[in-house]
Structure formats: C-alpha cells, structure tokens
C-alpha cells in the first residue's frame, strides 16, 4: 500500500513529492502527459518560494540557471520611449535571504525538482492517468489508465485547473472564465533584440499592450505575450508594430484564457487539492505557481505525520491564503499594475487565526535562522532544561516564552513552556526523523 498518490507533476506535485520523500514516506507521483512540458507558462519565483527551494536543497541550481527580472524597455516602432523596472533590486539581509523575484522558465524549475526527487529515490510516472477513485475511512483506491489499482492512505490532486480529482470529488470551482480575455503565449527565436531587457510594444499612457518579448535566462529563446484579438498571426503582429524585429522561429505556442477560480473545498476525506486544482489566477503578480508550491510545503509535513487534527488545518490555512492571493492577482490584472514588491513576494503571508497558530506570534513566518531551519523537523527556541525530540536553540533576543517553529518555517506555538506538551499532543505531532535527507 502506498502512503500518498500524487496526481500531477507540476511544481506543486513535485514539491509535495520531495517533502514526502525526504521524510521517508512511501509515495507515487503520476502524470498523464507522456513527457515533461517544453513551453514556458509560469516563470516568476517569489522570494518566499526561493526560501522553500533552499530548504528542499535546490536553490543553488535555481539561482545558477535563473536571473533577476530584466528592466522594461518600451517602444514605438523601433524607438525606445520609456525604460524602467517592475521591481526594485534589493540586497539580501538576515531576514530576507532571497529578496528579488527570479525569472526561471517553468520547464526548468520542474526539471530541477525532478532531479532532486530522483536523488531521493523517486521518479515521475509519465503517461499514467488517474481514471477514477473511491475512498472510505481506511484509505483510497485509485484506478489508473494502465489498468492498475493503487491502494493508498491519501490522494492529492495537483493536476491543474481542469483537475480530474476535483471533478470526481464533485467540488465546485467558483469564479469566472473570461472567454473574451485571452492571451497568446509563444517561445520564439529572434536575433534582432538584446537579452538584457524585457521589450514591450504598446501605449504606456493608455495601458495598452500590443505584445511583449522577454528573454528567458540561459536559453536562446524569448517569450512573446500578446492579447488575443482573433488573429493569431504572431509574425504579422510583430511586423506591424516592430518592423525591425523578425521572428526566426516559433518554438512553442499556446492560448491562455483568463481564469479566476477557487475550489469550494481543499479536502474531502482522504483526498486533498493543491495548486491550480484548488485555485487558478490571472498571470498578474506571478502568484499562481508560487501559491501552489506553498500549498505543497504546508501539506507535506502534515501528511508525513498523518494525525487527523493536523490534516484538518490544511484546508483552513490554505483556503484563507488562496482567497487573499486571488484578490491580489485579480486587482493587479484589472488595474494593469506592473510594479512588484512587498505585496507580491509572499513574505508577509501568515496563518493568523489558524487552530495551529497559538500565542502572540502564532502563525507568523519566523523570518530568521534559515540555516537552522533546514531539514524536516521542528525547531524550538527556548531556555529549557527539558529534553525534546527536535532541535532546541536559545531564545531570540527579547523573546518572551518559548517559540515552536513548524517544519514550514511558521511559528506554531508561542507561549509558556507549560502549555507546549498539550499543544504537541493535541495535534498528534510525533518525533521528527533525525536522519531525514537534506
């Protein structure tokens, strides 16, 4: 019997698989597509996601092959009429080790995560589709396109906006699909533009976009984005507004409809929804991929421990965050706001009000001691003579009471040490694995 079957191998599913694998949890991850994707959809990794990738052991490769977002250069024809940035380049600090948005094509992010998962002994099963499932209070029986029946304790749908898992659960996907608001995406090659700027044609005053062409780091490819107006002739579109730019090759292309939706439940029994299966966003602000990664980072350690009281907090915590982020990305899209920073970096997101968040700082991101937090266990900040089955460090300067930091970097308990045992037992938190892989 498999502990967890993950359906979908995008960034959400892969993050969850790594979280479980490094805790020694038996898992399988299946993907209906026969091979990894090649085109670029999401490409922005927020500072909070970079902290997660540090903990997962992939940050070096992410930073080595990605780059900070280039400056914008706006044109009329072949004339530059404006230059600026969508974000402010910031220096790293003790509290924010990765302060800048990093551009990384999603296909490469997924490849880096797959490589890390392989190091931990697991592979994505491509070309395998979930065709159905049943569940009871003892487990889930999943049916695969290969004819196999898989018995598992938990099933996680990370299978995108058209999620098979969500549909079979009968969970509503409230929101809107804007059929008239479509975007064309294409990966192209051209030798007529520099790779140090994000090139934009349109009217800044009227906030009208004809198209933009962005260089993708460590490739010879640019991503072209344009509103779909009924004419999908990208070569003609570029020739009309930028006759000095010639598209040499269209490597990949896709059409995107603006969707703003959220599932009415993130959990039904032993089945969970995460990433785009639970919420889909406009592309504004680069929130979708990053929110999915955070879903998985929240769920992974809870599945590994497996207590019902702990698993109940997933839906409570992540639905509140998804609702907030959907509001933010929708506002940025409607207002055509290009600036990025504190509102979008996801560092300020917290689990305030969660049953798992107790005390004055309960639910806050700790925001320090990142090296000490790496790994799979809890961290206790306390001046104590008692022995605990996890790492214990001295209190922070000015700290009152004890602070228990969850494996995902948020403060779970902040209060008197006398209440800690009841908190741990109440949520069924067991001893972390001391030998967990990094």
Image (cartoon, rainbow, N blue to C red):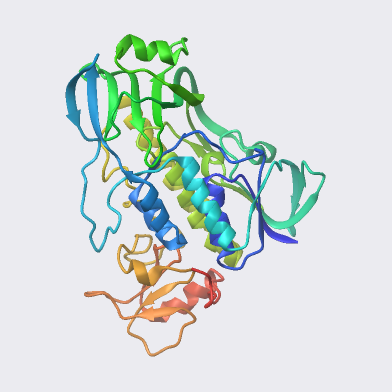
Residue at the image position 56 percent from the left and 71 percent from the top = 428
Residue at the image position 26 percent from the left and 19 percent from the top = 207
Quadrant for residue 3, please give it.
bottom right
- Give coordinates of residue 113: x percent, y percent: 51, 52
Answer above or below: position of 14 versus 375: above
| Residue 413 seen by the camera | no
- Give coordinates of residue 153: x percent, y percent: 70, 59
Residue at the image position 42 percent from the left and 68 percent from the top = 374
Locate residue 117 relative to residue 100 in the image: left or right: right
Answer above or below: position of 352 versus 261: below
Locate residue 253 relative to residue 304 in the image: left or right: left
| Residue 397 seen by the camera | yes
Q: Tell me the quarter of the image containing the N terminus.
A: bottom right
Count the marks: how many? Answer: 0
Quadrant for residue 146, please give it.
top right
Q: Residue furthest right?
A: 147
> 71 or 374, which lies in front?
71
> 120 or 270, which lies in front?
120
- Give coordinates of residue 100: x percent, y percent: 28, 48
Quadrant for residue 85, please give it.
top left
Locate residue 246 relative to residue 265 in the image: left or right: left
Locate residue 95 relative to residue 231 in the image: left or right: left
Residue at the image position 72 percent from the left and 57 percent from the top = 152
């Amino acid at each position: 019997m498999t502990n967890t079957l993950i359906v979908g191998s995008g960034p959400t599913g892969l993050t969850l698989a790594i979280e479980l694998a490094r805790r020694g949890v038996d898992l399988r991850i299946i993907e209906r597509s026969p091979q990894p994707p090649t085109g670029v959809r999401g490409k922005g990794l927020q500072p909070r996601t970079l902290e997660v990738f540090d903990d997962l052991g992939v940050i070096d490769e992410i930073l080595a092959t990605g780059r900070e977002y280039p400056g914008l250069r706006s044109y009329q024809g072949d004339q530059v009429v404006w230059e600026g940035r969508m974000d402010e380049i910031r220096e790293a600090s003790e509290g924010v080790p990765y302060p800048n948005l990093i551009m990384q094509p999603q296909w490469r992010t997924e490849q880096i995560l797959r490589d890390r998962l392989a190091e931990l002994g697991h592979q994505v099963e491509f070309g395998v589709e979930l065709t159905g499932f049943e569940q009871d209070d003892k487990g889930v029986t999943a049916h695969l396109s290969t004819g196999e029946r898989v018995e598992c304790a938990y099933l996680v749908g990370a299978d995108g906006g058209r999620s098979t898992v969500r549909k079979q659960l009968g969970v509503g996907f409230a929101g809107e699909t804007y059929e008239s608001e479509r975007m064309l995406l294409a990966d192209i090659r051209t030798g007529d533009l520099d790779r140090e700027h994000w090139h934009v044609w349109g009217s800044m005053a009227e906030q009208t976009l004809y198209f933009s062409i962005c260089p993708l780091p460590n490739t010879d490819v640019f991503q072209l984005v344009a509103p779909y107006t009924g004419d999908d002739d990208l070569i003609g579109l570029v020739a009309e507004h930028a006759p000095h730019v010639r598209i040499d090759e269209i490597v990949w292309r896709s059409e995107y409809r603006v969707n703003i939706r959220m599932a009415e439940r993130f959990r039904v029994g032993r089945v969970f929804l995460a990433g785009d299966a639970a919420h889909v966003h406009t592309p504004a602000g680069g929130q979708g991929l990053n929110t999915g990664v955070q879903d998985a980072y929240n769920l992974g350690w809870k599945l590994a421990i497996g207590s019902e009281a702990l698993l109940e907090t997933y839906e409570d915590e992540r639905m509140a965050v998804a609702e907030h982020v959907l509001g933010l990305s929708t506002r940025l899209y409607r207002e055509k706001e290009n600036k990025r920073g504190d509102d979008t970096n996801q560092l300020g997101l917290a689990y305030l009000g969660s049953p798992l968040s107790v005390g004055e700082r309960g639910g806050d991101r700790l925001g320090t001691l990142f090296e000490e937090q790496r790994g799979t266990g809890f961290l206790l900040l306390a001046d104590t003579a008692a022995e605990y089955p996890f790492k214990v460090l001295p209190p922070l300067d000015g700290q009152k009471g004890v602070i228990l930091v969850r494996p995902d970097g948020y403060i779970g308990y902040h209060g008197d040490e006398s209440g800690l045992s009841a908190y741990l037992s109440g949520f069924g938190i067991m001893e972390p694995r001391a030998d967990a892989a990094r």
